[in-house]
Structures are given as structure tokens and as C-alpha cells.
Image (tube, rainbow, N blue to C red):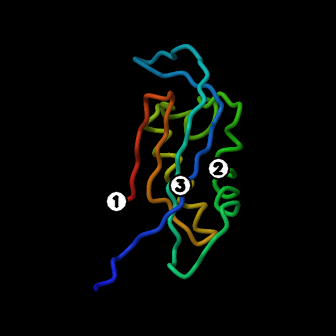
Amino acid sequence: MKKMEKRYSYRLHFYLNASHAMRWNNQLGEEHPHTWELICQVARGSDEHFIRFNEIEEQIQTIIDPLQGQFLNLVPPFDQENPSLEQLGEYFFDQIDHQLATVHCFLTQLEIGESPTRFFLVKRG
């Protein structure tokens, strides 16, 4: 019997409590809060390397924690670009993926939701 190829990953949930305002037609909308949910799917850089959950969580929190309680429109890069769900997804995917390299892991997928029914998905290509 041929051995089935398997891929392994970790799936972790995080929350960001912050506020933002959307920019439309050179105007700034009303500031409003969100609790964004981030669901990170993380793979090991090597099949032989096992890692503790808290090592992954600590690296991801270093990206999320500085934004807790902030008005995102004042925080780079969102002081220049719209802090939309899509832009947040792009930002968090790139930042978290880069940070995970320090523990020999990488991000395969990130889901970010602004409500229980509205999510945006970013996957590694």
C-alpha cells in the first residue's frame, strides 16, 4: 500500500480590538470600533521540526498587540491607505508570515473577519 502524503498545520485564533474610519471621495467616515478575528493557519518549515503552540502564538502577538486599542487610521501603513478588511488582511498576512520565520514556520492562510458573517481570506500562492 502506497503511503499517503500528508501536510500538517496549526490553526490559531486571535482578536484585535481597535477602531477605524473608511476614506471615501477624499472624506473620512465616522470612526467606529471592531473586534476583528484573525484565524492563522501555520505550517512548519521542516517536517522534522515540531514546535510548541505558545512559540507560534508569541510571534503572532508581536504583530497584533501594538495595534490593540488604536485608531488604525493613525498607524502606518493605514495613515496612508484605507484600513479596509482587505488591506488589513494583506498587511497581517505579510507581517505575520515574516515574523513566523523566526521560529521556522510560515503562514499558509489568514482569515480576517470584522463580524461573525464577514471574513476575508488570504492564501499563500
| Closer to viewer: mark 3 or mark 2 | 3
SS at circle 1: loop
Q: Residue 110: horizontal and vertical position, in percent?
A: 47, 49
Q: Point out the tag, 1 or 2, that comes first from the N-terminus.
A: 2
* Quarter of the rendering occupied by the N terminus: bottom left
Q: As shown in the figure, which amino acid type bears the numbered disc 3?
A: Arg
Q: Residue 51: horizontal and vertical position, in percent?
A: 63, 71
**42 w.r.t. 4: above or below:** above
SS at circle 2: helix
SS at circle 3: strand
* Residue placed furthest toward the bottom: 1
Is 69 on the left or on the right of 8, as rendered?
right
Q: Which mark is residue 11?
A: 3
Decide: few, some or many residues near mark 2? Use Cα within 10 Å; few <14, some 14-19, many ≥20. some
Q: Residue 68: horizontal and vertical position, in percent?
A: 70, 36
- How far is mark 1 from mark 2, CA to CA? 22 Å
Q: Residue 20: horizontal and vertical position, in percent?
A: 58, 25
Q: Which mark is residue 63?
A: 2
Q: As shown in the figure, which amino acid type bears the numbered disc 1?
A: Gly
Decide: few, some or many residues near mark 3? Use Cα within 10 Å; few <14, some 14-19, many ≥20. some
- How far is mark 3 from mark 2, CA to CA? 17 Å
- How far is mark 3 from mark 1, CA to CA? 18 Å
* Quarter of the rendering occupied by the C terminus: bottom left
Which of the 4 image quadrants contains residue 119? Answer: top left
Q: Which mark is residue 125?
A: 1
Residue at 56% x, 61% y is 98
